[in-house]
Image (spheres, coloured by chain):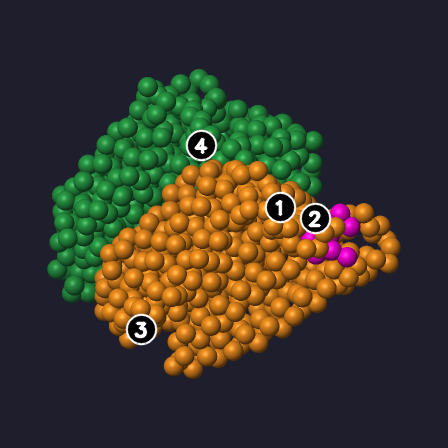
Chain colours: A green, B orange
Amino acid sequence: MGISLLSLLIWLPIFSGVLVIFIGNDRANIARWVSLILSILIFVISLNLYTSFDASTHLMQFVEKLSWISQFNINYHIGVDGISIPLIILTTFSTILVIIAGWEVVTKRCSHYMAAFLMMEGLIIGVFSSLDAILFYVFWEASLIPMLLIIGIWGGVNRVYASIKFFLYTFLGSVFMLLSIIYMYNKGGSFAIIDMHNLKLSFTEQSYIFWAFFMAFAVKVPMFPMHTWLPDAHVQAPTGGSVILAAIMLKMGGYGFFRLSLPIIPDASLEFSEIIIILSLIAIVYIGFIALVQLDIKKLIAYSSISHMGFVTLGIFTVFLSYKQEMIEGSLLGLEGAMVQMISHGFISAAMFLVVGVLYDRLHSREISTYGGVINTMPKFTGFVILFAMANVGLPGTSGFVGEFMVILGAIQANIWYGVLAASTLIIGAAYTLWMVKRVFFGVITNPAVSMLKDINAREFSILAILAIVVLVIGLYPQPVIELMHISIEHLLHQALTSKL
Amino acid sequence: MNNFIEFDTSSLWVVLPEIFLLSAIVVILLLDLFLNKYSQQVTYYLTQLSLLISGILSFNLIDHPQVIIFSGSFILDNMASVFKVFIMIATMIAMVYSRHYLRAHLLFRSEYFILVLLSILGMMVMVSGYSLLTLYLGLEILSLSLYALIAIAHERVYAIEAALKYFILGAIASAILLYGMSMIYGISGSLNINEIANFVSNTDLNSRRTLIINFGLVFLVIGIAFKLGSVPFHMWVPDVYQGAPTSVTLFISTVPKIAAISILIRILVDGLGSMHSYWSDLFMVLSILSITLGSVVALMQTNIKRMLAYSTISHVGFIMLGFVTGTLTGYSAAIFYTLVYILMSLAAFGMIILLNKQGFEVDQVSDFKGLSKHSPWFALMMLIVMLSMAGIPPLLGFYSKFFILQQIVSSGFITIAIFAVIFAVISTYYYLQIIKFMYFDEIDNKITINASMDMQLVLSMNVILILVVGLFPDFLIQLVLSLF
């Protein structure tokens, strides 16, 4: 029965999208309900992955393999392990949020909006479950198309610039990945990612492939200095677009490091790990300071996203430093921390962008200076905001704490100064997040429009409440998530630390 | 060696598609004299019918054992038959689009269809030509018909300019090609491709004879590069694309590419294949220049026909890269790219023609503004075509680029592959520009689509084919690989 589960998860959303397009913009209400029901259905199906997954093996599960392009031995080959499943569930979950969040707000071409998100859901699940490099690339690139349209059609004033910049940036990054994949095929005769894991590559080859992969994944994560597209894209994107972008699309970059970089090119990763760590630390500290001076709430959160994603890359690459000092324990912490950070950032950033969306829908402004004293008119809303802000800061008890703590722990074991720099985010992050909260929500009301604000309605309340519960549950009891991926990550660690030379 | 043309009636079966088409042209031409102005539609339907029948006749000759007839001047192999079938299909699609354009601009004349059929005959001769003379003959039939086709809108200044430009430059290119052929003929003493191939492969590459072969080779390459429209022999492409009536541009940019590729394969691969190391360097330079110039210059175009002309130049660069590899799979990749390009180009120009209205000529990129609002369906179609041209998976355009890249990487030209993908990304910008006009701009053009149902249907099918073959490209790839 498990055989068609993954295919269903990839294709059901895509065909749902087609269906919703055909419902048309004139029957927006039907389109909304159909999208919602389908996305919930898809979420429920994706939970099956979790329940019937066997976490005691690193082997790929739910595997399907069909011949696709026989000339190049390219197969429709999909399967998941403990690293992909949390990301897939995160995807299906976020899509529901996005559909509810766009319920009343999106009036322009409503059915197309819903359809774009549904299709993107399918394509991203495809990325997370492909075991064939070309299939991976196809899904990877194809997922850019709906995002391009989402930013370009439903975005803000400067949307054209932002959408095209987003597209070209990520496209440029990924073509080099394509070339490396082709190179490895010519060498090993197979596009299967698992065969590539076992492919012998010399150090020079590995270095080139490393930087090619780096281009693709670092743009997506995004890492300093390839991050400049992200603030533009986030600021211009509609709320739903920002949520998917921050919650899932950025994770594709991290996933790429996990699935391709570490196992395929371990020696180059070891060699260049220091550079990546420094770039990650720059992202964490420097981008944190940039976030501090933002006047635009959404931009602030976008920069905070970059800073938090710095922990993911930091966690991944401290593995090698710990290894050099023969501390396998620390390596495992780093990798698992990176994974937990990806999941938790998925929820927190989604929540933060939804919060901005709620404000923007009311006053059509993202400037911090427009607001002030929002707590007086929107007390329930402010309650949620403060919870998410604390999670963003990394307060113990929220999900933000778990991942960052694990990564910092790993970093300290590797090098105390790296640990100190990484830990400084707890101060910088608190500074920019809480200062923003103070300016927007507390104080006296200066803008008369703020005094007219209505508190969140049931729809908004329900999304934020669900997110709040998830953030708290993962924060208080992260064990199930960690158990789910533990064996897979151990196996990955083993691959990453086995030299191919 | 017998130099007179041997005649054997049984060999006529093999040239049945050509014979049929020629007879059809004569019949339609005569019939046209008796048709009044109101029944000219008949010419259109007869044209489609004769294309269909010669397509079926060619289709039946697929898997026919390879034969060379008429003293080695005509070959029938799988490649020829498959190419002919593709030529017929592409032309039939092009004619459906043409009809809408011709009606909208009062250019509906039966000469148009007859000239198209004549050029098809020329292409068929080129595809099956196996001696330098037949190839040249086919090329001239094709070119002369095209010159006249461009000038069919003789009241438009640009069309006349384009026709003259094409004629003069085309004549020079033909002369250069002919000069190269005469060199090869002079040294090898034969016009037949396989005799030339025998001669060249038996020639010691260090002997003085190689010098003369090389000399002729350069001229041949230049002539072929001109016909393909690759840099630096591309000057005619933007002007002709812009000046010609859009339906003629559509035709020129698509079907003759198959003929040009086949003449390239016949002369350079079949005939001078053992000289590959000499001409592949030339091709490498030509393709790099084409990709660069085509991608960069297209960025600044506001005229969509001109933009697509430069985009064609960059696509031609990719096609020529396939011949740099020197492997049969590499040549297959080039053929695959050509077929895919034709499918995309048909759809792109088809979309431009679709927006044409009575007396309203669409030729600016900005004419696509607001299409997504007035016709979401066709905006989606254009979106697919543009993304496919940019090479975004899962659309067909991706696989053609992938196939070429895979081949050049496996031949060891990694730097060229890196170069090619960077320019592929650059060229994405202008395809996105059209998407921007269709979807992102608020300004409204009040586009109405009043094309006939058959045009709308064929165009939609054309685009859906790009998507579906993109999802299941295996069949087409296998077909192309089986040609060698």
Tell me, yes or no, whether the two marked residues, 1 and 3, touch with CB atoms within 8 Å.
no
Instruction: Return the mark for residue B194.
Output: 2
Q: Is residue A303 magenta?
A: no
Which image quadrant for residue A412?
top right
Pointer 4 residue:
A76
Tell me, yes or no, whether the two marked residues, 1 and 2, touch with CB atoms within 8 Å.
yes
Q: Amino acid at mark 4?
A: Tyr
Q: Amino acid at mark 2?
A: Asn
- Between tags 1 and 4, which lies in front? 1
Pointer 3 residue:
B105
Q: Measure how far apart labels 4 and 3 are at the Cα level.
A: 48 Å
- Secondary element at tag 4: strand
Q: Residue at x 52, y 78 (%)?
A: B164
Q: Chain of mark 2?
A: B
Tell me, yes or no, whether the two marked residues, 4 and 2, touch with CB atoms within 8 Å.
no
> Can the viewer see residue A318?
no
When the figure is inspected, residue A354 is found, relative to residue B437, above or below; the finding is above
In front of the other: A400 or B285: B285
Q: Residues within 10 Å of mark 4 (few under 14, many from 20)?
A: some
- Between tags 2 and 3, which lies in front? 2
In front of the other: A424 or A66: A66
Q: Is residue A124 left or right of residue B412?
A: left
- Dominant SS of magenta comes to helix
First in residue order: circle 1 vs circle 2:
1
- Secondary element at tag 1: strand
Which image quadrant for residue B403?
top right
Q: Start and end of the magenta stretch?
A: B189-199
Pointer 1 residue:
B68
Q: Position of residue A47 (x, y in %)?
A: 30, 27
Q: Residue at x 42, y 45 (%)?
A: B56
